[in-house]
């Protein structure tokens, strides 16, 4: 087993999703290395349609593995701009590249979105240790 990683440029939700927020108010969302390891081999990812709006902490989809079906929780309030269609044909990208090719959503972050639940990489690593 390789050591789990938590990139410093990301923010982490306690429910094991991450968000990379750009200066233009857009963001990319996915699940953490810890989450994908706990799930095991990902077999299916169910994601919402573009245009769907979610509050921070709300369920936005599910990820299914041999072990379990787990809910996905939005790390920050926003509207889905794009879904990673590659996960439909290759859901294992979530395992092999959770912070890269295995991203799940591109969102437009809501104006004034609450970031109080988000943790930096050190706080998240301590949570899952």
Image (cartoon, helix red, strand yellow):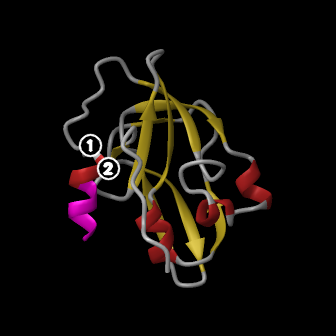
| 36 lies above or below 104 | below
Q: Are marks 1 and 2 in contact (CB under 8 Å)?
A: yes
Q: Using a 10 Å C-alpha cutoff, classify the residue at mark 1 as few (fewer than 14 neighbours), some (14 to 19) or many (20 or more).
A: many
Point out the residue furthest to the front here.
2
Q: Residue at x 27, y 67 (%)?
A: 128
Task: Place residue 126 in its image quadrant.
Answer: bottom left
Could you classify mark 2 by the number of other residues whose Cα lies within 10 Å: few (under 14), some (14-19), or many (20 or more)? many
Residue range (magenta)? 124-129
Q: Is 109 contained in the magenta span?
A: no
75 vs 95, nearest the viewer: 95
Q: Is residue 84 left or right of residue 103?
A: right
Secondary structure beneath dot 1 equals loop
Picture coordinates of residue 99, whole percent (x, y) = 54, 50
Residue 43, located in which quarter of the rendered image? bottom right
Q: Residue at x 44, y 76 (%)?
A: 38
Q: Which residue is mark 2?
A: 13
| Residue annotated with mark 1 | 118
User: What whole-number distance in Å separates the C-alpha atoms at marks 1 and 2?
Assistant: 5 Å
Earlier-in-chain disc, 1 versus 2: 2
The circle on residue 64 is: none
Q: Nearer the viewer, residue 14 or 125?
A: 125
């Amino acid at each position: 087993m390789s050591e789990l990683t938590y990139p410093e440029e990301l923010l982490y939700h306690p429910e094991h999703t991450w968000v990379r927020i750009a200066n233009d108010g857009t963001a990319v969302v996915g699940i953490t290395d810890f989450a994908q390891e706990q799930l095991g081999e990902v077999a299916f990812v169910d994601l919402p349609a573009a245009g769907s709006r979610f509050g921070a902490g709300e369920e936005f989809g599910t990820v299914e593995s041999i072990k379990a079906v787990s809910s996905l929780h939005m790390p920050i309030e926003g509207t889905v701009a794009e879904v990673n269609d590659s996960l439909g044909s290759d859901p294992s990208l979530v395992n092999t590249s959770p912070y890269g090719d295995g991203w799940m959503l591109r969102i437009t972050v809501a104006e004034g979105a609450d970031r109080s639940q988000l943790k930096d990489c050190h706080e998240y690593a301590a949570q899952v240790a």
